[in-house]
Every structure is written in C-alpha cells, then in structure tokens.
Image (cartoon, rainbow, N blue to C red):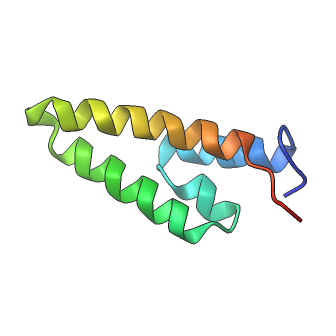
Amino acid sequence: MAGQGSGGNVIAAICNIFFPGLGQLVQGRILAALIFAIITFGGYALWFLVVPAIIAAVVHLWAIIDAAKYSSRE
C-alpha cells in the first residue's frame, strides 16, 4: 500500500464496512484481521447481552478507521 489516504486504504476501509477485518487482510495484516473479525463477530453474536454488541460496534468502527489510516513502515 502506498500510504495513508491512498486508494488502497480507501478500498480496505470499504471492505471493512461489509466484513470486519477484510480490509486488514487486503493490506496483508493477517493477525489484525483475525483479531478484528473475532471480536466483532463474537460481540454481534451476543447482541442480546447489549454490552458485547456495543463493544463490537466500537471495534468495527475502529477496524474501518485503522484500515483507512494504515501506512506501512517500508
């Protein structure tokens, strides 16, 4: 990826809107993708407990912002 604000980061952020963690996977960050996906889907699965769903929504938003602002250290 070219850096923050690049077209690749925009695509990654859009991917995260539909599937949390997919944007990080597109950027090649497998561990971050797994963590975001597990926390988000786990929290959404426990929606009836309310608090996990709120945490999942915050992590989902965090995943989108993380993918949009990511810049590689290369």
65 vs 74: above or below: above
Q: Residue furthest front?
A: 73
- Which picture quadrant has residue 16? top right
Horizontal side of residue 49 vs 7, given as left or right: left
Q: What quarter of the picture does the N terminus occupy?
A: bottom right
Horizontal side of residue 53 vs 1, given as left or right: left
Which x, y percent locates residue 44? 25, 42
Which residue does the image show at 60% across and 64% down from the upper left?
25
Q: Residue furthest left?
A: 48
Which residue does the image show at 87% across and 43% down from the upper left?
6
Which x, y percent locates residue 19? 47, 50
- Which picture quadrant has residue 58? top left
Q: Nearer the viewer, residue 5 or 11?
A: 5
Q: What quarter of the picture does the C terminus occupy?
A: bottom right
Which x, y percent locates residue 41? 30, 51
Which x, y percent locates residue 11? 72, 46
25 vs 43: above or below: below
Which residue does the image show at 85% across and 44% down from the upper left?
7
Q: Nearer the viewer, residue 19 or 74?
A: 74
Which residue does the image show at 33% across and 52% down from the upper left?
39
